[in-house]
């Protein structure tokens, strides 16, 4: 099989790292090779963050380059715009509708582009819009919006659902598994 | 058993498996997680030192004392540790000694790009470059073994992509190692000139032995495939080459100094065209060119920043005349550009008040390395210089001495961890040479930027055990500073008064702005809200650069969930239009 290349993009503090850990666990449980790369350091201070996950029989470079991503999971709208060139034209774009304004926008020095999801739809065939934050809040905790997104991705990637649930169970704190499972199921149902 | 580990976690595991008994470092991206991960192996004595030089020296002591030792730091940390490094390269080791240098091509979180393989050559010690987490783990053991066999410190050089990428690692049980016996050996460990001259000869002999050994070690590996193209590479670039040109012949170097000359000559003779793929300096390329071998490297690849697989495919593909089909890409032409998302001081960050006030008073600010360097960005923009760890104080003194117009206008701003790293000597200089500047220690009780590590004044060790917390104010008084003021930076009016007073007096002052990092201290204050009847959108509060306050549709709005209730904006608002949120908004 060809490698499965995934990009998880968002803003520092949104839980992209947990999501990528769950993805890696899915790969491991499926007996595949996996590499993950993330740039942190400044991430905690609200900068853009990206985690790259590559899954396959044998993975060399851990980096996903322009035009190579089978799916982009964007935890914030603006970030999908930033990383759109990385997705394959036939790739999946999954966007949380959450908006986190960067400082130039906060200061009124730049505009936050409007209608991002509609714009993206003019460029890629498969774009899914997810009110991840709203769904997470309805589950009882806005922090599980990342797990909602994992649920949406899981449905599209083709590994069995049981593998995803087991991976989730292995990667979240036991006390938080129930609420994360609820969030995952709601995402999976989209 | 297999596990998915980052390069840093793998190095920690490698140290544990190879029987390392001492691990020492100073935090610095991308090296920090090595020591954080080593804490899970209580068999290994591990500690943060105040800076890389001290860390290296503690490591030297551990090695001479007989322990297998690992010392970790980022690339610029090796600059700080260079003094003991160059002489320990003469002394050599007792227990094996590995220096991990984590380089940062692309400057993801560094002030410069430097290729620390040059240090290995300069200090005449071997350098190993792993290409994934498995090798990161295995090379620790290999480096220790080289160290003990050849009586030399060894550098293990990673880059950000190695340190922070995760890949599969086969775990093994730790090998039992005993401490080596310590015996007094003054001609080896006391580097007076007479002894140094003898060791100088030893170093050259050692290097010659290492050169011969380089041609026999499995750290260097030839993968002969299509003979039309031969690529010599190391580290993460090996992965880019394998990804881009899977059919190319490759000489993968695990040991990049000293180089295996015979292996390189053999490889070169078996391929039609020879290339080097390496990030940053033409380190391999120059050495191979000096051997009289024709090779292309930096003619194709940049010396600046990182290399990618796509770059390898395109550049070498063109040299070989290969048809490289263009990757189909999504057209982004005509889409609005995404505004940049630079890192910012967090909501509730205690540094914000300091930079707001420094800007208001139009002071010249010499800065330092840490989260607070973000005070240079809009809208705070209250910083004039940032050079390296600890530089703020010396730079402030130099400015004042050189330019009378700056006297009484310069404030040095330095974090608590950075102050212990290398600010103390600068402060002593300012006292000694009669500086009249103001030094501010932004004491948030942690090493924040690298992810909250302990330091000599946090009262905790690397393992979180209680330790004595150095008292900065007492230290300053003992140095001879009479004006030492401690203040809570959230008291905006008080902070301004103190800054006005201390910059106006014709003697040195130390202001300690004391308030824990907002990410450490769980916010206890009630968040605030905008009283829309009072707010006239004067935008004064926006000058704080707080991510919780935004201008939306021309109106000031508050992002309540991320507000920590630090109340700075309430203090800044002249119309009392920012008030404490009611319970219904909690």
Image (cartoon, rainbow, N blue to C red):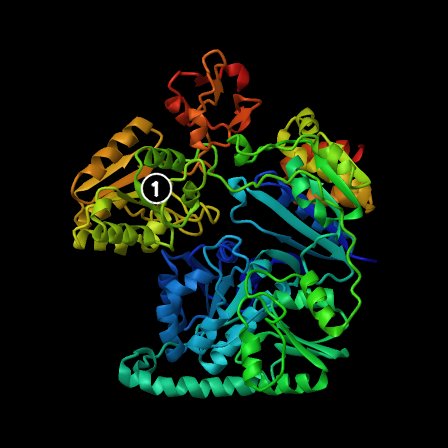
> Residue B323, position in %: x, y?
80, 67
Label 1 sits on residue? B442
Q: Quadrant of the N terminus of chain A?
A: bottom right
Kindly give the residue lying farthest to the top in the view shown: B533
Q: Is residue A155 left or right of residue B477?
A: right
Q: Is residue B235 left or right of residue A125?
A: left
Question: In the displayed structure, would residue A73 be above or below residue B172?
Answer: above
SS of the residue at dot 1?
strand
Q: Tell me where residue B226 sits by quadrant.
A: bottom right
Instruction: Choose between B105 and B472: the one closer to the eye.
Output: B105
Is A109 situated above or below B435? above
Please determine whether, in this image, residue B551 is positioned above or below residue B64. Answer: above
Q: Position of residue B64 (x, y in %)?
A: 38, 73
**Residue B375 point in image, percent of width and height:** 41, 41
Q: Residue at x 17, y 54 (%)?
A: B432
* Relative height, residue A33 to residue B551 (above, below): below
Q: Nearer the viewer, residue B452 or B299?
A: B299
Q: Position of residue B125 (x, y in %)?
A: 46, 77
Which residue is located at x 48 percent, y 82 percent? B150
Q: Nearer the viewer, residue B540 or B132?
A: B540
Locate the C terminus of chain A and report the quarter of the image it occupies. Answer: top right
Q: Quadrant of residue B63?
A: bottom left
> What is the chain identity of the residue bearing mark 1?
B
The answer to whether residue B559 shows anywhere in this view is: no
- Comparing A139 with B315, the one in front is B315
Q: Categorize mark 1 by other alpha carbons within 10 Å: few (<14), some (14-19), many (20+).
A: many
* Whether residue B121 can be seen here: yes
């Amino acid at each position: 099989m060809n490698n499965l290349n995934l990009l998880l993009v968002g803003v520092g503090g949104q839980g992209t790292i947990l999501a990528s850990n769950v993805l890696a666990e899915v790969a491991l449980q499926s007996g595949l090779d996996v590499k993950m790369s993330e740039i942190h350091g400044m991430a905690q201070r609200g900068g853009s963050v990206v985690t790259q996950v590559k899954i396959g029989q044998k993975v060399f470079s851990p980096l996903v380059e322009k035009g190579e991503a089978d799916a982009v999971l964007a935890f914030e709208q603006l970030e999908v715009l930033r990383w759109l060139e990385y997705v394959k034209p036939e790739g999946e774009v999954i966007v949380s509708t959450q908006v986190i304004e960067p400082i130039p926008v906060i200061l009124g020095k730049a505009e936050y582009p409007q209608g991002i999801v509609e714009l993206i739809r003019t460029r890629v065939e498969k774009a899914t819009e997810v009110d991840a934050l709203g769904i997470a809040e309805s589950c009882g905790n806005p922090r599980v919006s990342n797990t909602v997104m994992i649920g949406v991705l899981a449905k599209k990637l083709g590994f069995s659902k049981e593998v995803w649930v087991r991976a989730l169970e292995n990667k979240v704190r036991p006390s938080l598994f129930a609420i994360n499972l609820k969030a995952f199921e709601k995402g999976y149902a989209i | 058993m297999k596990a998915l580990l980052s390069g840093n976690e793998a190095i920690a595991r490698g140290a544990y498996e190879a029987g390392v008994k001492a691990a020492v470092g100073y935090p610095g991206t991308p090296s920090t997680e090595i020591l954080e991960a080593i804490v899970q192996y209580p068999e290994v004595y591990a500690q943060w030192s105040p800076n890389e030089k001290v860390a290296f020296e503690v490591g030297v002591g551990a090695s001479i004392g007989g322990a297998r030792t690992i010392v970790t730091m980022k690339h610029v940390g090796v600059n700080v540790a260079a003094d003991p490094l160059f002489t320990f390269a003469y002394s050599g080791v007792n227990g094996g000694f590995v220096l991990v240098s984590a380089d940062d091509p692309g400057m993801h979180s560094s002030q410069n790009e430097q290729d620390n393989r040059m240090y290995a050559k300069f200090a005449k010690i071997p350098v190993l470059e792993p290409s994934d987490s498995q090798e990161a783990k295995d090379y620790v053991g290999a480096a220790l073994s080289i160290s003990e066999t050849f009586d030399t410190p060894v550098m293990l050089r990673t880059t950000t992509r190695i340190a922070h990428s995760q890949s599969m690692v086969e775990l093994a049980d730790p090998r039992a190692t005993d401490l080596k016996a310590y015996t007094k050996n003054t001609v080896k460990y006391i580097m007076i000139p007479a002894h140094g001259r003898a060791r100088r000869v030893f170093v050259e002999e050692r290097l010659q032995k290492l050169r011969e050994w380089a041609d026999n070690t499995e750290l260097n590996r030839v993968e002969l495939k299509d003979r039309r193209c031969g690529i010599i590479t190391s580290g993460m670039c090996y992965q880019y080459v394998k990804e881009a040109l899977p059919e190319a012949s490759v000489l993968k170097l695990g040991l990049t100094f000293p180089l295996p000359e015979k292996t390189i000559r053999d490889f070169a003779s078996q391929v039609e065209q020879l290339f080097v793929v390496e990030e940053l300096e033409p380190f391999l390329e120059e050495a191979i060119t000096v051997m009289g071998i024709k090779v292309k490297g930096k003619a194709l690849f940049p010396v600046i920043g990182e290399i990618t697989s796509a770059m390898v495919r395109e550049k070498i593909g063109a040299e070989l005349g290969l048809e490289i089909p263009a990757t189909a890409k999504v057209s982004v032409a005509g889409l609005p550009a995404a505004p940049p998302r630079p890192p910012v001081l967090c909501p509730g960050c205690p540094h914000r008040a300091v930079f707001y006030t420094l800007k208001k008073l139009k002071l010249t600010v010499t800065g330092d390395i840490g989260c607070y360097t973000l005070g240079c960005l809009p809208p705070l923009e209250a910083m004039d210089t940032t050079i390296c760890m600890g530089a703020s104080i010396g730079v402030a003194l130099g400015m004042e001495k050189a330019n009378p117009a700056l006297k009484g206008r310069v404030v040095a701003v330095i974090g608590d961890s950075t102050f212990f790293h290398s600010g103390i000597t600068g402060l002593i200089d300012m006292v000694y040479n009669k500086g009249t500047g103001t030094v501010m220690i932004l004491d948030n009780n942690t090493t924040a930027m690298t992810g909250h590590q302990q330091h000599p004044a946090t009262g905790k060790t690397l393992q979180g055990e209680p330790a004595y917390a150095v008292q900065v104010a007492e230290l300053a008084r003992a140095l001879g500073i009479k004006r030492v003021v401690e203040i809570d930076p959230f008291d905006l009016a008080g902070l301004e008064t103190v800054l006005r007073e201390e910059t106006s007096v014709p003697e040195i002052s130390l202001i300690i702005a004391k308030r824990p990092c907002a990410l450490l201290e769980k916010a206890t204050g009630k968040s605030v809200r905008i009283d829309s009847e009072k707010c006239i959108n004067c935008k004064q509060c926006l000058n704080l650069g707080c991510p919780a306050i935004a201008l939306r549709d021309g109106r000031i709005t508050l992002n309540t969930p991320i507000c920590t209730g630090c109340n700075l904006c309430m203090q800044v608002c002249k119309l009392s239009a920012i008030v404490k949120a009611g319970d219904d908004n909690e």
